[in-house]
Image: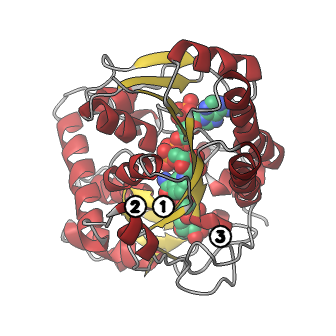
Amino acid sequence: MKRALITGITGQDGAYLAQFLLDKGYQVYGTYRRLSTPNFWRLQYLDVFDKVNLIPADLLDTSSIVEAVRVAQPDEIYHLAAQSFVFASFEQPVGAGEITGLGVTRILEVIREINPSIRFYQASTSELYGRGSTIPQTESTSFQPSSPYAAAKLYGYWVTRIYREGYGIFACNGILFNHESPLRGLEFVTRKISNAVAKITLGMDKELRLGNLEAKRDWGYAPEYVESMWLILQQDKPDDYVIATGEAHSVREFAERAFTVAGLDWEKYVKVDERFLRPLDINFLQGDYSKAREKLGWQPKVKFDKLAEIMVREDLNRWGRWLKGEKFPWDAPNYPSEDRIISRMLKLDR
Ligand code: NAP
Ligand code: F7E
């Protein structure tokens, strides 16, 4: 039985990947952070909480990573843990470097020391391309990161290649474009929209405040994207791959589509709020996944319209059940209103 270690198993991708690998017959280990309140709702939601082995570890603490690798003895490590919210990386830029950047080297060093035959997947990102990039983006498009998050990921991308080329470690980058699902964190724009649409439809909210409506992203469906991570580590040679849908849509279009799913006119509810603008934003990301299609046999099935529909229907279902008194694992009831969050990024007088 193959053994996999997933860092960041409590996140969107970590939970879906755990489910995918369990279905493949893997013994799955996952690292999680010790928090004052448990954060296992996604694993419970997918009904895999009792099937995975959990190891406390923090990317800031190398000794905890050593322990995780010693305990799990993995054939494959999927390194998904990161401070993944771009907006927050402007609030905590040093943390972005420490966690999202240096965290990669800490894990690669542990692999090099303990067992260099472990295969390593690095969660790289379309954010690497940044502003003003040529379209569509491929594996050979140049990178111009536009946030502390992207700069940290650029470091992680290169250190992965350096350990591959310098030490012969089977280390790969999946350059994944945005991928969403009902398990997406509430701060990301698609889930913020689907959650608000559900609450407005059910009379629990009145409006939705968003930032840059013109930004275009290549949005795919997370459960399909975790399969690509596995495929990347099953190849004969380590390499880097773009994973995307090949389509770009704006935030405005996502809002329009999401409200339409619920039979509402988005323009009546969406307000632009400057607090959600970033010091720098990327206006256009659209991936070319030809290499993944040819070499991995991977291609996306769920595209933009269907994705928005899946997300809105699931948030409607959750809030509907919640209104009837049912309790089940899910993040929204505990999420503070953004008006209650004091952040230098959310100041009104910028
Ligand atoms: P996510 O839902 O935000 O999950 C991030 C995970 O990292 C969580 O399990 C989180 O733990 C963990 N983490 C954060 N800081 C940590 C630390 N200091 N030590 C240990 N663990 C820590 O992100 P995701 O959407 O699943 O994305 C997975 C990875 O893919 C991330 O590296 C992200 O940057 C990258 N990526 C995502 C996308 C996308 O569109 N989703 C696209 C390209 C690349 P807690 O639960 O305790 O917070
Ligand atoms: O923003 C705009 C915002 O926060 C998308 C992460 O998974 O994907 C994700 O990063 C766009 C941006 O995701 C709001 O300015 C408008 O242009 O959903 P997001 P992201 O920044 O693209 C990449 C691939 C990753 O690697 C990251 O880890 O939407 N936008 N209004 C807004 N965004 C948010 N969050 N909230 C708004 O109100």
Q: Is mark 1 within 8 Å of ligand 2?
A: yes
Mark 1 residue type = Val
Left or right, residue 18 beside residue 344: left
> In which quadrant is the C terminus drawn?
bottom right
Work out how far the residue at label 2 is from the one at label 1, CA to CA, in angstroms. 6 Å
Mark 2 residue type = Ile
Is the residue marked by circle 1 packed among few (<14), some (14-19), or many (20+) residues within 10 Å?
Answer: some
Image position of 181 with respect to 63: above or below: below
User: Nearer the observer, disc 3 or disc 2?
Assistant: 2
Work out how far the residue at label 1 is from the one at label 3, CA to CA, in angstroms. 14 Å
Q: Position of residue 207 (x, y in %)?
A: 41, 63
Secondary structure type for disc 3: helix
Pointer 3 or 2: first along the chain: 2
The residue that label 1 is drawn on is 189
Left or right, residue 276 beside residue 150: left
The residue that label 3 is drawn on is 274
The residue that label 2 is drawn on is 193
Q: What residue sits 49% from the left and 75% below the top?
A: 287
